[in-house]
Amino acid sequence: MSLTILTIDDSRTMRDMLNAALTPSGFTVVQAEDGEHGVEVLDGMEREPDVIITDINMPRKDGFAFIEDVRADPRHRATPILVLTTESDAEKKQRARAAGATGWIVKPFDQDKLIAAIRRVAAYSG
Amino acid sequence: MDAMEAIRQTFFEECAEQLVEVETGLLAFQDGEADDETIDGVFRGVHSIKGGAGAFHLDALVAFAHAFETVLDELRSKRIEPDETFVRLTLRSADALSDLVAAARDGETADTAKSDALLAELEAVTGSADEKAEADEDGFAFQPVTVDVSTLFGAEAGETTYTIAFRPHDKLYARANDSMTFLRELSTMGEMQVTCDTEALPLLADIDPEAAYFGFVVTLTGTLEAEDIRAVFEFVEDDCELQIDAASTDDADASFEMELATPDEADLLVLQAMLDGTDQDEEAIEATDEHASFADTEGVGAGDPDTAPESALESDPAQSGISRSSGSEAGKREPEPSRQQDPEPAKDPSVSTPAGGKKEAGKPTKAAAGQTIRVDLDRVDRLIDLVGELVIHQVMLSQRAVEAGLTRTCDVATGFEELEQLTRELQDSVMAIRAQPVKSVFQRLPRLVREVAEIAGKRVRLVTQGEWTEVDKTIIEKLSDPLTHMIRNAIDHGLETPEDRVVAGKPEEGTVRVSAGQRSGRIVIEIGDDGAGIKRDKVRDIAIEKGLVSPAAKLTDDEIDNLIFMPGFSTASGVSELSGRGVGMDVVRQSIQSLGGRVTITSEPGKGSKFTMSLPLTLAVLDGMIVTAGDETIVVPLSMIVETMRPKATEVRRFGGEARLINVRDRFLPLIDVGLLLGYRDRPGDPTAGVVILVEMENGDRAALLVDGIQGQRQVVIKSTETNYGMIPGVGGATILGDGRVALILDVDRLVTCSREAGHSLDPATLQAAE
């Protein structure tokens, strides 16, 4: 069964790139445009996504707040969340970790590495 | 590759949007109207550009965006006190960023001199912060451990054996990580053995299903560095105890003190049974009966951290292979349902809060923002053309119906009326698709003003108004050039130097005000400055010198001001290189006129000048009055018409040679004989036999047009005479009437001007003075 990935990024470019990287590899990609929208989309999903990939700098609700919200909801607290961002400083990583992020990937991403990371946290190796 | 190209295109489209947001935000900041959200928006814009640019390996853009972003971050976190110099630096950086984006888009090499200089300035601002960040980065990096490979027993050449002690904290699981994933990752790096330490596991009754009780000792042999191992745990290093040692293959030699215990089988079975009761599938149960494998733990691991199955990890060397194959099983991902059924989380109030309700309260839905589609403009244009044709045919059809003798009250005629209304509504709706706020043009102005001001050595504040005024896209595109030119003119000629302004008792900084608004079916754009106003003596002298007016001519202030639009005037010596650029105001006027628009100037000495540019909202349709002159049918734009009247003989007076005036409520207006002026007849028409149409022009002046008769009001589809034939003074375009004939659409302002030039009439101002 294909893994469902929820991606959250305010940049259309980045959403398109994620889609282009994941869909051909057999992932089902669901997208949201910011943290606020991400929460709405997540709540509306029939099945919990296998992995959530979120940006940090977004309008309305940033990645940190989004992760906190997701983690605070018992339904989503075990869903792996990968942060995908251009940032790489330790303080931001620490904040993401504190919010409950599962992993951290730096943009621009390498397609194979991204997929490997998804499979790793989703415990999928097929 | 096509997909990449499409994304690349999206990226540049998005860049354009973000650059606008960045500039708008910075300008708001400059005006002191920015809040934290504005600065965040600016930061995000630059940040997104950097992110996308990185994906396309646009290194120059990434470097610059990064420096810019760093500065903005300082601002955002209030570590910088923004002064005027700083604000200007950010604005100039936004311009440079825009240039770099454009260069990247067009595949050109950017002029790096400018951006490099700015880069240095930006870095100077954040110099100290950067150094700090680098230091952080260093501290964060792993210090490699020196290992003497040759002493290791059993290791092949180049291989090292590491002993890794890994003990997850509760937090690791709370962040949806799983010890499993790390162990599996390690297993791909070399030969692996895992021992689970269950020492900390309490009695069953005391188990907190969310707590972490197990530790793992991994022996890993392979061609790898300790760094590689640490990298696996990089993101969770604070969520676990991790110790990596180069060791021999013998477990007994492990140098750390973790006690290794074999799990008690009885305990295991009990635990397993407990888990079976929830959601463990049959396969997993079977597996547990033998040796618990990684696959078993998988089903529980992510959801129920460190409960029983992991304690079964008494691994043998073959298990590095098993761990990889276990993935298909793991793919099932059972933990979520188990989570939901699990009553335990209620223990922790912060966790059990039903967050769903909290989130939904009072939040705007995303739907409203997302309901737009992108359509190729050609399709819209085609639609507009078709609707235009539809309108023409609908008119023709109803006219045929009248010709066929149908009365106005019959059902068919009523049907035609309804059809006409629908067609009209359809046309309006279609036009609305192409309508855009003038914002897209206005948003380019701040940069223009900055650049022009810098070159001219003046200080200028730009105020824009009415940027949401909507106008047809075809007009928007053509607004930019004349607007640009008039603004250059306003800054270069209108505004004084800061010193002169101070002498004149004005603030050093001049103001250029650009406003847009709709007025009687037209868009009116005003460009005003608070400069010195037009130096009429000088303008007059130049005009005389150029032979544009006779030295004897008595000119009103208004006429002198408008001399600057005369062809040939702008080449005068007084025009600097800046606003000159090879284009005179006459060309500006011409380009506006070709759009069916017009431009006028008003000026007040010492207080400033104002250009007023008026354009139709669309180039596609027009509400017109259909009139006859001579034997021709012509269209007068309805928006210009004030009233119509049948003049009495006593109201018309001769003035000078051919010119005639008409007395309208004790005011004399020039009477313009349209048929004569357009050459439809040779002799002046009889005013008492015709109809007079009173029109008001852009500058507020009125004139009276004499025509033979009025046919009625109609919406007409404009066909450009300029494209299809050539420019005719006094004619704004043409249309096809119901009977299939072509009718000219009058450009009233131009027509009145023509009549003055032709000497058929006199200027109303002079006439009023003569009264």
Image: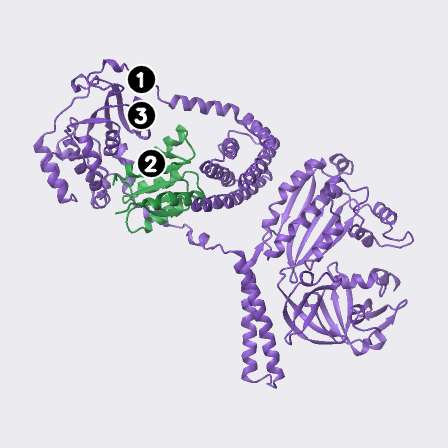
Chain colours: A green, B purple
Q: Which corner quadrant of the image does residue B124 belong to?
A: top right
Residue B622 x, y percent position in the rendering: 64, 66
Distance from disc 1 to disc 2, alpha carbons, whole Å, reads 29 Å
Identify residue type, mark 3. Asp
Mark 3, other Cα within 10 Å: few <14 / some 14–19 / many ≥20: some
Is tag 1's residue or tag 3's residue first in the polypeptide sequence?
1
Mark carried by residue B145: 1
**Near-viewer residue (B491 or B759):** B759
Give the distance between the C-alpha atoms of the residues marked 2 and 3, in whole angstroms.
21 Å
Residue matched to label 3:
B228
Task: Please determine whether, in this image, residue B44 is positioned above or below residue B231.
Answer: below
Residue in front for this viewpoint, B242 or B342:
B242
Q: Position of residue B221 (x, y in %)?
A: 23, 23
Numbered disc 2: secondary structure: loop
Q: Estimate how packed mark 1 is, as few (under 14), some (14 to 19) or many (20 or more) residues with alpha carbons within 10 Å.
A: few
Tag 2 residue? A101
Do the CB atoms of the residues marked 2 and 3 lie less than 8 Å apart?
no
